[in-house]
Amino acid sequence: MRSARITYVDALNHIRHQGIDGEEVFFSNQEKKLFLDIVKKEAGKSGIKIFAYCITDNEYQLLVQNTSGKLSEFLKNINKQYSMDYRKKFGEKGKIFFDRVFSILIQDESYLKIALAKLLLTPVRKGITDRIDDYLWSSVNEYFKQKDPSFPDTKTIKRLFQTKAQFLRYHQNFKIDDVLNFYPGYGYIMGDKTFADQAINMYSTMVYKKRSDRSIKTSKKRIAPESLISQFEKEKNINLDKIDTHSFPGKRLRGELIVYLREKGKIPYKVIAEIPFFSDIKSIYLGRLCCQTKKRLLSQNIHTKKSKSHH
């Protein structure tokens, strides 16, 4: 699973994860409750604050604050646990969720209200119900109980809306505007450009802090992997978000990107393993894939030169 694109400690993220090819993964209320119990347990263990959730037959959505900086670990754990139970119950093999998690970084609480509305209006948009408060498998009815529940975190939402009537009126009158901006190499950000620049800088800083002491002390500065990824996408005229790494061309392209990162920026394998495009590959296997790809590219170059010499 490729985890959330851009996040950092205390970042606000809207997470959406679908079943493969949009297939159903939560067939009944029993499966939805099981998944919700897993989310609740893992959120407590990982220190992730959950503001809202919505589970439909083929996807789940979460509105979170990455309070511990362990959002990627949290998402991997909930998917792994639910997938294990799913396969055990239905006898399926392989992955049940789409390889990439769709993640939006949110600027502040004014944008949080927009993200919340988009999430809670999902059952209405899908034609499941006409009113958001009629849907059982979202957090919509948790916010204005007499006693605040332990899950999800309702205090922030109650502060934003103050009363249930104001909360429901906002969602009833909500118009979905396109407030998302896409930044190659980083993903979707809901906010203005100043925030986006600051967020990208914070994310890059967080990634580099995870490098070894030896790498940090090196006097020669390395090019940021995010910058190299953008260059690679431009040179290949592709968007990595749209690449299926299960396909043969996708696997080859992933190998070529590793070579590109190693040769252009001397990016350590441990850092490459933290890039969402490679998050489902252990760092110990990246070196092998890099060597295999180098051999293939060398063989291609030799073959191309021979073909040209014959002509």
Image: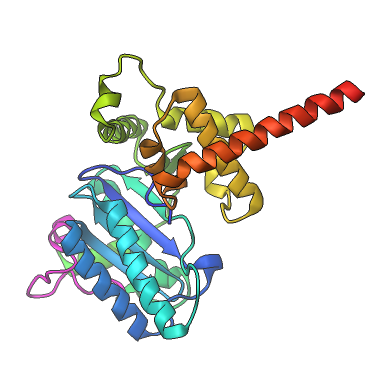
Q: Which residues are magenta?
A: 136-162
Q: Is residue 142 left or right of residue 1?
A: left
Residue 156 is inside the magenta segment: yes
Q: Residue furthest top?
A: 219
Residue 98 is inside the magenta segment: no
How many numbered discs?
0
Query: Which quarter shows the C terminus?
Result: top right
| Placement of 3 over or under 137, stated as above or below | above
* Residue 140 visible to an observer of this rendering: no
| Placement of 9 over or under 163, stated as above or below | above
Counting from the top left corner in percent of width and height, residue 98 is at 49, 62
| Placement of 56 over or under 184, stated as above or below | below
Counting from the top left corner in percent of width and height, residue 144 is at 15, 71
Query: Which quarter shows the N terminus?
Result: bottom left
Query: Which residue corresponds to the image point at 55% horizontal and 31% vertical from the top-left?
Result: 232
Q: Is residue 232 left or right of residue 204?
A: right
- Name the dominant secondary structure of the magenta segment: loop
Q: Nearer the viewer, residue 97 or 87?
A: 87
Q: Is residue 90 left or right of residue 294?
A: left
Counting from the top left corner in percent of width and height, residue 238 is at 61, 39
Q: Nearer the viewer, residue 2 or 145?
A: 2
Query: Which residue corresponds to the image point at 21% horizontal and 43% vertical from the top-left?
Result: 9
Counting from the top left corner in percent of width and height, residue 263 is at 51, 25
* Colour scheme employed for the rendering of this structure: rainbow
* Residue 155 lies in quadrant: bottom left
Query: Which residue corresponds to the image point at 60% horizontal and 42% vertical from the top-left?
Result: 253
* Residue 40 lies in quadrant: bottom left
